[in-house]
Amino acid sequence: MPISENAKAVLEKRYLIRDENGQPTETVDGLFHRVADAIAQADAVFDAGADVAATAQSFYEMMTGLEFLPNSPTLMNAGRPLGQLSACFVLPVGDSMEEIFDAIKNAALIHKSGGGTGFSFSRLRSRGSTVNSTGGVASGPISFMKVFNAATEAVKQGGTRRGANMGILRVDHPDIMDFITCKNDTREITNFNLSVGITEAFMQAVEQNTDYPLVDPASRQITGRLSARKVFEAIIQSAWQTGEPGIIFLDRLNRDNPVPSLGEIESTNPCGEQPLLPYEACNLGSINLVRHLKKTDSGWALDRDKLSDTVRKAVHFLDNVIEVNKYPLPEIDQMTRSTRKIGLGVMGFADMLLYLGIPYNSEAGVEMGRTVMELVESVGHQASQALAAQRGAFPCFDQSVFRDAAPLRNATVTTIAPTGTLSIIAGVSSGVEPVFAYAYIRNVMDNTHLIEANGILKDVLVSRGLYSEALMQQIVEQGSLAHIAGIPEDIRRVFVCAHDVSPVWHVKMQAAFQTYTDNAVSKTVNFPNSATQDDVREVYELAYRLGCKGTTIYRDGSRQEQVLNIGKVN
Ligand code: CDP
């Protein structure tokens, strides 16, 4: 198995089954057999004569060959009594005490199982408005978000992974200004990522520098008007200061809503890549692109046949996950099976570019992003059609936007996940992000530190007789190769890290992947500490123009706790 010691440490710490003394009762190899066997079982549901053992073997080989990995909850829970396999959920938050606290309870159950939850708080009446039953005044969405946050904090202590939430508020909610600044104190609402739900009408008002109406969701009354530019500036100012809130383009999420008759999409999962209807869950999986290269006479090249083959197997795998999944609520079971959304994506894209000798921040890099994702998307849809022929289309197909086209087994097929843990297991760059640093220390949970150096760079330096400990030390300290004179220009041009990539290239790459992704793309646009608010505005406007579904930015050093630290040993 090509799994590194670091990857084994992560798997042992978080994923292996343990006895009551905390001792693992399975091996890493056993984990992959457990997952492959459990997921292959679904074949028998559709075909009594299916060769389940052969499917299990092919799933096992695909995972242990690090060609494809399903999201963490599948690795943790498949073949176990809990059996909750999805990473992403969206829960509705209705405007009553019962509905608010039902959502908190349901979120706690999901967090316990390793899933993340997204919520739109846009239906909650605004702060200070009337409460009919008591004649009192309403607390408003932000004060309830703090309750959700505290519940997540408490559940975290028992679970294997820290509960994560997305909180969304529409830009026309009367409490929007409080929402934009509610995490400026970075100790507040720490278990949430926040995004402002931006509408087309708002973006037009920004462009034309006009006011727009604020609407109370309970009374549907216009409660006031704000200058769109002022609100846009406030979002930029806050994001520049702390990285939050992000923005999501609600009308774009709904333009791509495959079954509008089931409802409106109001939220995404915690990291923003998976728009979902209320009570919908989605399971993700990612293909490791580094394992889909072949050696040719002129160097490395994308192995299109192998990639196509893995895409077909992965779609089969993820559709099976929907079948054997044990959902935390009957509503989620019903909703998720009616659309059968899956989210197949990629990881190791930046590493692949290093092998190909293509800089991430170049037209050729962006073109390669399009090439790869176009293939994943088209073969993924063919595979979902082939499954529909065997297993039937997803139950709501006849009400879907695809009803006049070939039946699909899954209402969505592709999503680009962050692959925070999966990329460590596979030992590659995460998602479609550039390499963060070529030699660095990674803080994992509980103050565990993993030292990682980029093997691709090391091999190139060794082969050119340039490798030395002192040079690696210099890279750790500087975090980038850009200013190291001892490294030749042709290497520095290709081996760029996240901070060498200008924000504009980050957005161009996100947009390239979005073009061929049914759901959305997890991407952080990294800014240097010296970036200005104008730089942030430029990126937001570009993301909007290029068709992205949202934007998350992070300015280096703007938050105290960074997951990845350049050059820090502690
Ligand atoms: O690599 P892994 O499968 O562990 O997860 P990821 O790709 O980094 O994140 C995918 C999704 O899992 C996120 O968008 C969240 O919905 C969920 N997640 C979570 O609930 N809690 C976390 N601590 C990390 C991820």
Image (cartoon, rainbow, N blue to C red):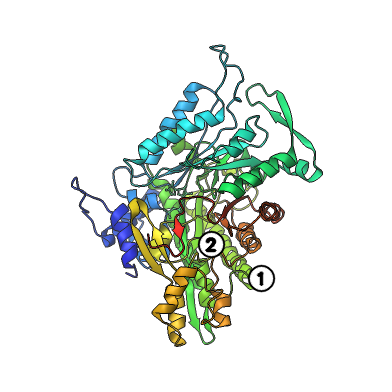
Sequence-wise, the earlier of marks 1 and 2 is 1
Q: Position of residue 310 (x, y in %)?
A: 46, 65
Q: Which residue is mark 1?
A: 363
Q: Secondary structure at mark 1?
A: helix
Q: Would you say 176 lies left or right of 292 here?
A: right
Position of the N terminus, as image quadrant, is bottom left
Determine the residue positioned at 77% across, 41% down: 205
Q: Position of residue 244 (x, y in %)?
A: 57, 45
Q: Position of residue 225 (x, y in %)?
A: 74, 30
Three-letter amino acid code of the residue under disc 1: Glu
Depth order, front residue of 59/525: 525
Determine the residue positioned at 58% across, 67% down: 500
Three-letter amino acid code of the residue under disc 2: Glu
Asked if residue 165 is positioned above or below residue 137 in the image, the reply reads below
Q: Would you say 23 lies left or right of 347 here?
A: left
Q: How far is mark 1 from mark 2, CA to CA?
A: 16 Å
Q: Where residue 433 is drawn, which disc sits there?
A: 2
Q: Secondary structure at mark 2?
A: loop
